[in-house]
Amino acid sequence: MSLKCGIVGLPNVGKSTLFNCVSSAKAQSANFPFCTIEPNLGSTSVPDKRLDKLVEMCNPRSIVPATVDIVDIAGLVRGASRGEGLGNQFLANIRECDAILHVLRCFDDGNVVHVDGSVDPVRDKEVVDAELQLKDLETVDARLSKCDKAGKAGDKEAAKLAALLTRYKAALEQGKSCRTVKLLNEEEETLSKGLFLLTDKPVMYVCNVDDASAVDGNAYVDAVREAVKDENAQILIISAKTESEIAEMEDYGDRQMFLEEMGLEESGVVRLIQAAYHLLGLRTFFTAGADECRAWTIHEGDKAPKAAGVIHSDFEKGFIRAEVIKYEDYVHYGSESAVRAAGKMGIEGKEYVVQDGDIIHFLFNV
């Protein structure tokens, strides 16, 4: 899919530690600002219990999970929009990402340096937001000037874009991100995507807490929740320190025992990877059999021919129909043949919108 989630935040909040946990790549991790200079890109498998179940049922010769790309981006400081620190590089790298994992430090530790000298995740969030908003305001002002002139000259499309840009400008000048502006219709959604604004990207706030707060969070997390309540953004609580310890354990049983002792049902990294996948608007369909069980990645809302094209371009060009089994039916009846016998297999055409978890066999002719 070539979509990427960028891990961003101030220096020394735990970005690279989390990246090390979720990615097959390994970023340097150290207790000083700007440890990360060049963005680190890693691709990691997306944990999916549905694929695990299909593998258990089919006992295939090959297993292929879905993957998601994560980028660890250099820490940002005040003045980044004016080029301070690694600002220009930071902003360029984040512009290339499709969604943001904004890591906030929500733990006290005198041994870990904070760039501003104290722990305050809401302030940290506002520092990053302000720099991104200032850069977006530059972009919006430049585009608005051109669109205004074209709109007054009779260009209807330019006039529509100018109206949207005016609303973005008003929000940014109030210290609000572009994602808080409600789009009125699909046409505005299309126009918005073409602007590539930094504060319009989907965001999830990752609250990096101490071990004791990994389950329920703490006062810092509560403050973040209050601060982002109007943003339509997700929050995920995770202890990077705990996750790094889990990542070093090679034995699955040891990892599970450690999680139980912590009061956790599953690793925070699992939840983070799954959340990143969905934040990008990605969904999964499966092919299952004795040869291979595979998770295929599509965009939410993709129709059957588009999904077929993910497997091979010929499948999309010569699409005839899709034979669709719901995951729950496959598990209930135990096999494709049993599903067919029970009359639970759906025969779908070109307009079928693939649902997350569908098990599909495509028929095509080229």
Image (spheres, helix red, strand yellow):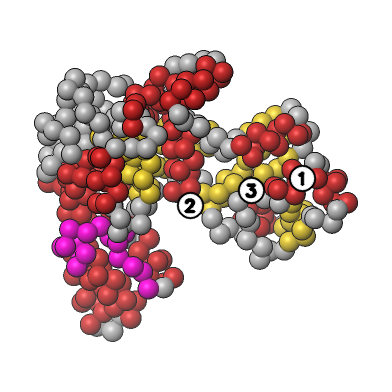
Tag of residue 332:
1
Determine if the magenta segment contains residue 174.
yes
The residue pinned by badge 2 equals 281
**Residue 235, percent across and down?**
36, 45
Q: In the rendered picture of this protein, how many numbered marks are placed on residues?
A: 3
**Residue 40, percent across and down?**
35, 30
Residue 46 visible in the picture: yes
The residue pinned by badge 3 equals 357
Vertical placement of residue 118 versus 88, above or below: above
Pair 2/1: label in front: 1
Q: Is residue 6 left or right of residue 173?
A: right
Write the start and end of the magenta stretch as one range. 169-184
Pair 2/3: label in front: 3
Is label 3 in a helix, a strand or a loop? loop
Say what amino acid the circle numbered 3 marks.
Answer: Gly
Tag of residue 178:
none
Q: Dot 3, how many residues are within 10 Å of its Cα: few (below 14), some (14-19), or many (20+)?
A: some
Real-space Cα distance between discs 3 and 1?
14 Å
